[in-house]
Amino acid sequence: MRELKISKEPIELYKILKFENLVNSGGEAKFVISEGLVKVNGKIETRKRKKIFSGDVVKFGEENIHIQVK
């Protein structure tokens, strides 16, 4: 599982995919989220601007990302 340390919370879901280079652009991140391809804490999430907090786990494809505040 990959660890992502953020400087402040919350962070919007689509930004995590973009910053971690799991997609090529913010638009692509929003598309894959709206298509139901992303899970947050084990549940499919379709809200692009879903607020993600420390302790949350984001899954996209084979990548699991655990979010932590620095």
Image (cartoon, rainbow, N blue to C red):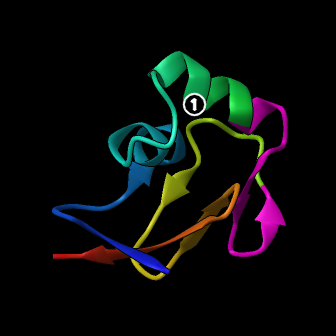
What amino acid is at disc 1? Ala
In the image: residue 65, left or right of residue 32: left
Mark 1, residue position: 29
> Which residue occupies the extreme front position in the image?
62
Quarter holding residue 27: top right
As displayed, is residue 30 above or below residue 70? above
Coordinates of residue 31 in the picture (x, y in percent): 70, 24
Q: Residue at x 46, y 82 (%)?
A: 55
Q: Residue at x 42, y 36 (%)?
A: 18
Quarter of the figure with the C terminus: bottom left
Q: Residue at x 77, y 41 (%)?
A: 46
Around disc 1, counting alpha carbons within 10 Å, would you say few (fewer than 14), some (14 to 19), or many (20 or more)?
Answer: many
As displayed, is residue 11 above or below residue 49? below
What SS does tag 1 mark? helix
Coordinates of residue 69 in the picture (x, y in percent): 24, 75
Q: Residue at x 50, y 43 (%)?
A: 22
As displayed, is residue 49 above or below residue 25? below
Coordinates of residue 6 in the picture (x, y in percent): 24, 63
Magenta highlight range: 33-44
How many numbered marks are there? 1
Quarter holding residue 40: bottom right
> Which residue occupies the extreme top position in the image?
27
Q: Is residue 39 magenta?
A: yes
Between 62 and 52, the one nearer to me in the picture: 62
Q: Is residue 67 magenta?
A: no
Coordinates of residue 56 in the picture (x, y in percent): 53, 75
In the image: residue 43, left or right of residue 26: right
